[in-house]
Amino acid sequence: MVSEIVYLNGKFVPYEEALVPVEDRGNLFADGVYEVIRFYSGQPFLMKAHMERLERSAREIRLPEIDIDALTEAGLETVRRNGIGDGTLYIQVTRGPAPRNHAFPPNPRPTVFMIARSFARPGEELRGQGVSCITVPDIRWLRCDIKSIGLLPNVLGKQQAKEAGAFEALFVRDGVVTEGTSTNAFAVREGRIVTYPEDEHILPGITRRLILAIARREGIEIVEEALKVGELDRVDELFISSTTIEVLPVVSVDGRPVGGGKPGPIARKLQEQYDRLVEKVASGESIDDFI
Ligand code: PDD
């Protein structure tokens, strides 16, 4: 097998040679931020928005300034060098290596790492039949708007979902659903899309933003408010979104059916419009202006 080519600190190197010092602050403190960007037929999907979010995340944790244009170019090159068609680009920026000490090192040298991997779109089975979720307490910190690599509550939640035979765990804080462990969550109530507002309790998903832009164009009303966990079995539809899974209907939560236990028409409509945008991107058009 030909080795993967990884981007590390300005160089493209074989996977085996992409080594980071043991005292990298990403390793010691999860002191870093990341992005996951989708590619279809080798073309980036909403990369500009992802890079802007990376820039913001980096700023919020006070990383030294990063050159987003250079990083975008390097990201595109990483995808090209690995011949990725449908896949993802993972970008991680940490505060770099330094002797272990909680406070910032005097002259941080960030570690920038990127890897591109093939990733298939969700199949018709998942899209058509929907997925099940469980709920878990949202034990995360109060800056979930930062795409931090500190993901232990998310990891534990997803593992709990897996062990329960579910696809995703939905976080519940103060009796309301915030988001999934790696997805944003939406309900449909009386024809309106209800989703948690953009604040420090959720990641402002790029897919979330795209879905809301599609909904607006389709004339679907949007209500950005918290959904009570007790209301879940009374909503007409529930669905989750992310860069990797796109839009997936949720048909049960904690073993109870949602929306009659079947995917609903609004999720379907959003999936159809999403597919159109994927086709556009795959044919080389940018949809950066859509959101
Ligand atoms: N996760 N909420 C959380 C907590 C997430 O980790 C993600 C993405 C999302 C959806 O954001 P977006 O639409 O921008 O992908 C919401 C990525 C895919 C991951 O960690 O792999």
Image (tube, rainbow, N blue to C red):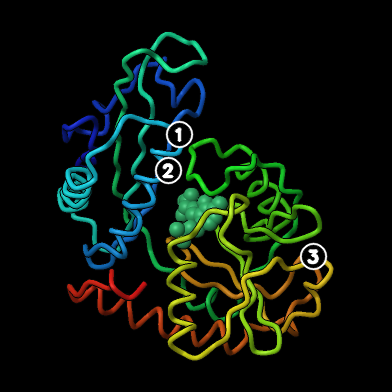
| Residue indicated by mark 1 | 61
Closest to the observer: 123 or 75? 75
Amino acid residing under circle 2: Ser
Q: Measure the alpha-carbon separation of dots 1 and 2.
A: 6 Å
Amino acid residing under circle 1: Ile
- SS label for mark 2: helix
| Residue indicated by mark 2 | 57
Q: Measure the alpha-carbon separation of dots 2 and 3.
A: 29 Å
Residue name at image x 22 percent, y 49 percent: 72
Marks 3, 1: nearer the viewer: 1
Residue 10 screen position, x and y as percent: 17, 32
Q: Is residue 78 left or right of residue 153?
A: left
**Residue 222 drawn above or below residue 115:** below
* CA neighbours of label 1 inside 10 A, class few (<14), some (14 to 19), many (20+): some
- SS label for mark 3: helix
**Residue 284 drawn above or below residue 153:** below
Q: Is residue 81 left or right of residue 152?
A: left
Q: Residue furthest right?
A: 230
Circle 1/circle 2 CB separation < 8 Å: yes
* CA neighbours of label 3 inside 10 A, class few (<14), some (14 to 19), many (20+): some
Circle 3/circle 1 CB separation < 8 Å: no
Residue 1 screen position, x and y as percent: 23, 42
Amino acid residing under circle 3: Val
Residue name at image x 66 percent, y 52 percent: 162
Closest to the observer: 143 or 148? 143
| Residue indicated by mark 3 | 229
First-in-chain label (2 vs 3): 2
